[in-house]
Amino acid sequence: MLLRITPTLSHPLHTKAQTRALEARLAASLPPHTLMQRAGLAAARLAHAIAPHARRIGIVCGAGNNGGDGLEAAVHLQALRHRVSVCLLPGAGPLPADAQQALQRAQAAGVQLHAPGGMPQDAELLVDALWGIGLAAGHPRPLAPEARWCLEWIYRSAAPVLSIDTPSGLDADTGQLLPAVAQLAPAAPAGPRHTLTMLTLKPGLFTGAGRDWSGTVWLDPLHPGMPEPASGWLSGQPTEPATSQNTHKGSFGDVLVIGGEAWQHRGRGMEGAAVLAASAALHAGAGRVLLHLLGSSEGSQRPAGIAPEIMLRARTAIALDQGVVVCGCGGGELVAGLLPEVLQRAPRLVLDADALNAVAQAPPLMALLRERAARPGWQTVVTPHPLEAARLLQSGTAAVQADRVQAAQALAAQFGCLVVLKGSGSVIAAPDGRHAINASGNALLATGGTGDVLAGCLGAHWARAGLEPDAERYWQATLAAVWQHGHAADAWPAGQALTASRLAQSLARQPEK
């Protein structure tokens, strides 16, 4: 059964170790060669569907079972009257038994075999069956010249590429290109990319570099049923609860946004960040939105550009224990002075941007953030980008990006709160160890202010979740907010520039069903 993975539905994710364990159990229960033959047939069918009129298809096969899958695919593609050429990478020893049988079948079918460097260069589709999930187990460094040639051909191909199981060189757990191969890859693929992953969905296909190099992801479980418990989830479109007509603005909760260091403080006005968060909360459905701009003088004129529905609040009129507090967007230096009170008095708190930087620089603030987890019913979510996460973890951005799931889980465990680690394939983690990877969103979000919009969107979803101290409800509200934020970019009209202010306003639209 072939399933195309879209941002709409939620799916379980499984690590490489879990996948290998499942593969071993299935192989022991099925006739010899069954899994490889099924994998090869599935890959051939998808390759034919991607490029039904391709006259020549090139397949790069490694010296392991992933290469065996590619050889099996070659047999079926040859039968479909494609001209198939196979580059078989030499290995350190004989092929595994299943792959050896697949090679014999390919030779019997008349598939052309070539050494690296001798492949015809006119392929209209490439099939990547080089390593799959096997490279991370320990590949020799530096790469052999034959392997370098194969990888560079795959990485730089403008023709469509179909990867079997995992794009070669990509760590299926972390979504990062492995150091041995990263230097060979361009910044982005030159042509369309597809991945047919077998048995399970791997987290690395959906975060970090995995999103670019995996492209459109397809799953074939090869066998009915999924006995392995999920290590995490690919989050999809949330189910919106039915809304009663007998409601009022109080039914949807209050959001108080604190941020936006005033221009008068340092000549670096950041009011716009807080206004963006407030606008997002308003359009994402909060009942009331209140805004406190840091450093603004009492009785000062209402800044231009703030929607009339957003209510300004002076420092003396802030009620931190009412509704959801979104703190930090554009807070600059001034937010640190208010954070001790916010951390100790706001039962429901979204911490973003400069608030996170202030916490990372002050051990007493870090202690106050950790102490919130011991308060019954209190909920906190932090929304760092990779650099902010690195500061909180006292590590480096490269270390965070090297394993985004682990970094998010470490933050959740350290501070006892929910974490949204932003980036390509945002990772949501909880203190109990569970995590999800968000399936929506695209590069249009790589513009200033969209993170502030996410913070406000989270505030609205949390406000609508109600006042009950239900951790599961806040987990689901967090998943829904992150998905809606990304979906707004996915649904953005082609050819129109996405700005943070327009993104915030678009949250008022209902998600497509």
Image (cartoon, grey):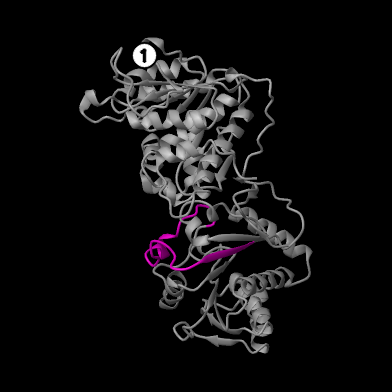
Image: magenta residue range: 172-198
Residue occupied by mark 1 = 314
> Is the magenta region chiefly helix, strand or loop?
loop
Magenta includes 355?
no
Q: Secondary structure at mark 1?
A: loop
Question: Which residue sits at x=38%, y=23%?
Answer: 365
Could you tell whether 284 is left or right of 385 in the image?
Answer: right
Image location (x, y in percent) of residue 490: 52, 49
Q: Is residue 220 visible?
A: yes
Tell me which corner region of the image, top left, top right, bottom left or bottom right, holds residue 392. Answer: top left
- Number of other residues with Cα within 10 Å of mark 1, as a class: few under 14, some 14 to 19, many 20 or more: some
Residue 106 percent coordinates (x, y): 65, 84
Quick check: can you spot residue 96? Answer: no
Vertical placement of 382 versus 186: above or below? Answer: above
Q: Name, please, the residue furthest toward the left.
A: 267
Q: What kind of residue is marked 1?
A: Ala
